[in-house]
């Protein structure tokens, strides 16, 4: 049985739900008003935590790079080490791009546009937003977009 979560007074979607106290274990449900202050705060915190985790991992990578020599005496060890670092740096680059998407999602929360498809204007499902909080399109719009991309790449 799901319960309705009462709306929080004094918090508007345009402010991103800041100052809203989330109940312990809160998860958005379809029984609530879509993108109410609790949902906005839930996703805002989730995005901020994700960004904090990525930045922490980047700092760890940088510290290891600065403290560990990349020169291994054995050629095979050196090649293996360089390959590992190349993969690590590529991962960090992807995460740098991800941070910009997280920042864009946080701006959409502030602007009251978060959770709505940028193509159709329809609500993005809560399940999709929980799985991918930076989503900007509904599944259907995303699939259509990817099909169009594939067609244009094939031309």
Image (cartoon, rainbow, N blue to C red):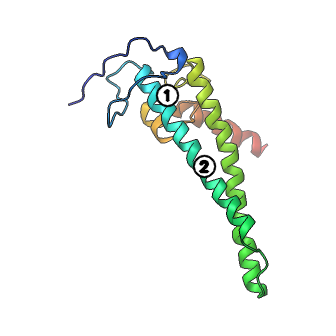
Q: Secondary structure at mark 2?
A: helix
Q: Earlier in the sequence, mark 2 or mark 1?
A: 2
State the image coordinates of residue 91 (x, y, percent, origin top left).
67, 56
State the CA–CA distance, disc 2 to disc 1: 25 Å
Q: Quadrant of the N terminus?
A: top left
The residue most toward the top is 10
Whether label 2 touches label 1, CB < 8 Å: no
Q: Residue 2: name its quadrant.
A: top left
Total numbered badges shown on the rendered structure: 2
- Is residue 56 shown above or below 77? above
Front residue (pair 44, 115): 44
Q: Secondary structure at mark 1?
A: loop
Residue 21 in the image: state x and y as whole percent: 38, 26
Residue at figure coordinates x 38%, y 12% from the top left = 9
Picture quadrant where residue 135 is located: top right
Q: Where residue 84 appears, x then y in whole percent? A: 69, 70
Tag in front: 2 or 1: 2
Q: Residues within 10 Å of mark 2 (few under 14, many from 20)?
A: some
Dot 1: within a 10 Å radius of its alpha carbon, few (fewer than 14), some, or many (20 or more) residues?
A: many
Label placed on residue 54: 2
- Foreground residue, 60 or 121? 60
**Residue 55 % position (x, y):** 63, 48
Residue, x 53% and y 30% (percent of image)? 138
Which residue reaches farthest left? 1
Above or below, 51 against 106 in this view is below
**Which labelled disc corresponds to residue 81?**
none
Residue reaching furthest front?
67
Q: Nearer the viewer, residue 49 or 142?
A: 49
The structure residue drawn at horizontal position 38% and vertical position 18%, both measured from the top left corner, is 33
Q: Left of 60 or right of it: where is 37?
A: left
Q: Quadrant of the C terminus?
A: top right
Disc 1 marks which residue?
Answer: 124
């Amino acid at each position: 049985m799901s319960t309705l979560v009462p709306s929080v007074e004094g918090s508007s979607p345009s402010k991103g739900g800041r100052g809203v106290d989330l109940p312990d274990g809160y998860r958005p449900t379809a029984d609530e008003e879509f993108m109410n202050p609790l949902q906005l705060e839930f996703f805002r915190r989730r995005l901020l935590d994700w960004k904090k985790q990525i930045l922490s991992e980047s700092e760890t990578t940088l510290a290891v790079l600065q403290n560990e020599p990349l020169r291994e005496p054995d050629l095979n060890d050196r090649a293996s080490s360089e390959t590992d670092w190349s993969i690590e740096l590529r991962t960090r680059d992807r995460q740098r791009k991800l941070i910009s998407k997280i920042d864009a999602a946080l701006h959409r929360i502030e602007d009251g546009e978060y959770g709505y498809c940028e193509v159709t204007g329809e609500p993005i499902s809560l399940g999709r937003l929980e799985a991918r909080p930076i989503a900007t399109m509904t599944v259907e719009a995303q699939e259509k977009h990817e099909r169009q991309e594939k067609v244009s790449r094939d031309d």
